[in-house]
Image: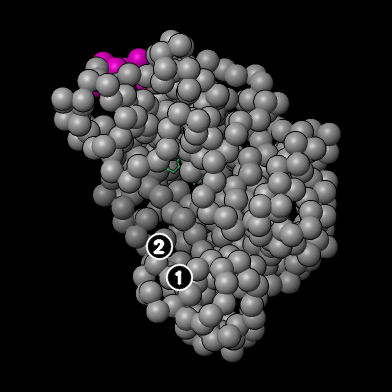
C-alpha cells in the first residue's frame, strides 16, 4: 500500500521533481511512513534523525513526512524534529505539491471524503507489474490494528475508473496487476468484488490479476467461484488468519472462529485445485496463554500454508488491545514467534519440494537479484522461480519444469 502511495506522490510531483538516487543531493526528501508495528516507527525516527545534517548548508532543502506515522503523530513529529517542513497523512497525497511550494499549510491530516472519487496521477517504473488501488481505508477495527485510525473509513473506487486505469496499463505493456485494499472482499461500488474481477478479466493484454488483502470473514462463495472460473485471476490468496485460537480471535475482533476459518480454506482448495494459501500470524497477543499458542502451532500443521508472514504483537497507541490486561514479555513473544517461523519453514520447504518435477507457467520478471546468471519469474501461485539465463524478454510467459524446491524459491529449466 505504501509503495503504491509513493508512486502517487511521484505522480503528483512529476512536473516539478524527478527522482535522485542520492538523498544528500535531493531538493526534497519525503518519508512515506508505516505505523503498523512499533519497529517501523523506530526505524523511521532513526532515519529522520540521521538526515538532519543534510540540511546544513542547504537551507532550501525540504523534508516532508507522509504516511501513517504522520497521520497518527501529527504535530508531535515537529516537536521531535523541528527541521521537518511539512506533515501529511495518507488521505492527503493530492495536496503534496501545494505543501512543497508552501501554497498550503504545513499540516494536512484531515479526512478526505473524495479520496475514492478523484484519481491521482501515478508514476510507475516497473513496466510489467502494477499496483492498482480499488479501495481505501478499513472499517474492521481489529483490536490490535492502527490502520482504521490512520487510513480512515472504507471507500471504494468506481469500477469504471479502475477498468480504465487497467486498460491504460495494458496499452502501456503491463501484464500483471495487483488490486489493493485493506479488505478487498468488502469492495462495493456499482458492483462487488467478484463483479470487478469479472470486468477486469476482460482487459486484453493483462495476463494476470492478483489482489491483497482478503478478510476471511468476508470471503464469499461468489469470490471463490470467480477465482476458479476466471483464467486471469491467479490461484493464490493471502488470507490472514492471525491466530489458531478462537478465544484469541474473538479478543482480536476478527469476526470468525478457527473452525470457520479452516472451512473457508477447505472450500478454496476444493473449488480451486492447486491454489496457494498464505497468511499472517501474530505471536503473543495480550492474554495469549501457552495453550492458545499451541493451538496456533497445531493450526499451522493442520492447514499447511504455502507461506506466512509472522510478527510479534506490537502495542499500538489508541487501539483496544493496547488497553487490555496481561501484555506478554518481549522474551515470550520472541520465543513463540521463533517456534511459529521454524514450524512454517519446514512446511513451506516440504510444499515446495512437492513441486519438483511439475511444469509451471512463469511470468519472466528479469535478472535475478541474487544471481546475475539467472532469470527470475513467478508462478501463478506467486512462488519465485529461478532459471538459467536465456535470451527471452522480460514479460514473457514461459513453461518451466521445476528441478528444485527450496524454502524461499524454486529452481527450474525451460
Ligand atoms: N502487532 C503485530 N502485528 C500486527 N499486524 C497489524 N497490526 C499489528 C500489531 N499491532 C499484522 C497483522 C496484519 C499485518 C498486515 O500486520 O498480521 O495482517
Ligand atoms: Fe487492520 Fe483488521 Fe483492517 Fe486489516 S482488516 S487493516 S488487520 S483493522
Q: Tag 2's secondary structure?
A: helix
Q: Looking at the picture, how far across and down is residue 408, in whole percent?
A: 44, 70
As rendered, which of 397 and 148 lies closer to the eye? Answer: 397
Give the CA separation, mark 1 to mark 2. 29 Å
Q: Looking at the picture, how far across and down is residue 247, in whole percent?
A: 55, 44
Q: Tag 1's secondary structure?
A: strand
Q: Is residue 6 above or below residue 95?
A: below
As rendered, which of 291 and 328 lies closer to the eye? Answer: 328
Mark closest to the chain's N terminus, 1 or 2? 2
Q: Which residue is mark 2?
A: 341
Q: Which mark is residue 15?
A: none
As rendered, which of 43 and 395 lies closer to the eye? Answer: 395
Residue 80 painted magenta: yes
The CB of the residue at mark 2 lies under 8 Å from ligand 1: no
- Which of label 1 and label 2 is nearer to you? 1
The CB of the residue at mark 1 lies under 8 Å from ligand 1: no
Residue 105 painted magenta: no
Q: Mark 2: give few (<14), some (14-19) or many (20+) Cα within 10 Å.
A: some
Q: Which residue is mark 1?
A: 367
Name which residue lies at 79% across and 54% down. Answer: 203
Amino acid at each position: 500500500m505504501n509503495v503504491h502511495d509513493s508512486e502517487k506522490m511521484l505522480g503528483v510531483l512529476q512536473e516539478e521533481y524527478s527522482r535522485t538516487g542520492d538523498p544528500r543531493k535531493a531538493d526534497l526528501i519525503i518519508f512515506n511512513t508505516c505505523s503498523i508495528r512499533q519497529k517501523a516507527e523506530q526505524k523511521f525516527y532513526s532515519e529522520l534523525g540521521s538526515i538532519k545534517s543534510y540540511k546544513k548548508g542547504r537551507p532550501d532543502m525540504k523534508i516532508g513526512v507522509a504516511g501513517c506515522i504522520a497521520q497518527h503523530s501529527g504535530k508531535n513529529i515537529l516537536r521531535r524534529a523541528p527541521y521537518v517542513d511539512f506533515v501529511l497523512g495518507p488521505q492527503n497525497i493530492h495536496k503534496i505539491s501545494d505543501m512543497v511550494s508552501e501554497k498550503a499549510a504545513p499540516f494536512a491530516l484531515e479526512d478526505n471524503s473524495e479520496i475514492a472519487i478523484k484519481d491521482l496521477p501515478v508514476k510507475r517504473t516497473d513496466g510489467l507489474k502494477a499496483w492498482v488501488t480499488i479501495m481505501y481505508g478499513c472499517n474492521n477495527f481489529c483490536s490490535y490494528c492502527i490502520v482504521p485510525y490512520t487510513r480512515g473509513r472504507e471507500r471504494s473506487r468506481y469500477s469504471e475508473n479502475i477498468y480504465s486505469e487497467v486498460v491504460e496499463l495494458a496499452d502501456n505493456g503491463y501484464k500483471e496487476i495487483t488490486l489493493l485494499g485493506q479488505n478487498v472482499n468488502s469492495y462495493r461500488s456499482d458492483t462487488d468484488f467478484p463483479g470487478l474481477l469479472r470486468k477486469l478479466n476482460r482487459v486484453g493484454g493483462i495476463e494476470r490479476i492478483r489482489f491483497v488483502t482478503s478478510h476471511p470473514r468476508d470471503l464469499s462463495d461468489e469470490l471463490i467461484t470467480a477465482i476458479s472460473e476466471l483464467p486471469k485471476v491467479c490461484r493464490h490468496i493471502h488470507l490472514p488468519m492471525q491466530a489458531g485460537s478462537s478465544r484469541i480471535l474473538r479478543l482480536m475482533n476478527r469476526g470468525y472462529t478457527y473452525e470457520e476459518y479452516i472451512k473457508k480454506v477447505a472450500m478454496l482448495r476444493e473449488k480451486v485445485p492447486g491454489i496457494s494459501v498464505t497468511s499472517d500470524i501474530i505471536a503473543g497477543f495480550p492474554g495469549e496463554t501457552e495453550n492458545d499458542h499451541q493451538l496456533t502451532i497445531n493450526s499451522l500443521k493442520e492447514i499447511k500454508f504455502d507461506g506466512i508472514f509472522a510478527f510479534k504483537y506490537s502495542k499500538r497507541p489508541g487501539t483496544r488491545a493496547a488497553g487490555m490486561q496481561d501484555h506478554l514479555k518481549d522474551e515470550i513473544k520472541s520465543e513463540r514467534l521463533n517456534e511459529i517461523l521454524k514450524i512454517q519453514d519446514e512446511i513451506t520447504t516440504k510444499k515446495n519440494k512437492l513441486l519438483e518435477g511439475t511444469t509451471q507457467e512463469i511470468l519472466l520478471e528479469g535478472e535475478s537479484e541474487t544471481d546475475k546468471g539467472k532469470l527470475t519469474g513467478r508462478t501463478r501461485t506467486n512462488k519465485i522461480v529461478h532459471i538459467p539465463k536465456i535470451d527471452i524478454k522480460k514479460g514473457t510467459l514461459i513453461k518451466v519444469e521445476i528441478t528444485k524446491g527450496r524454502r524461499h524459491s524454486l529452481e527450474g529449466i525451460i
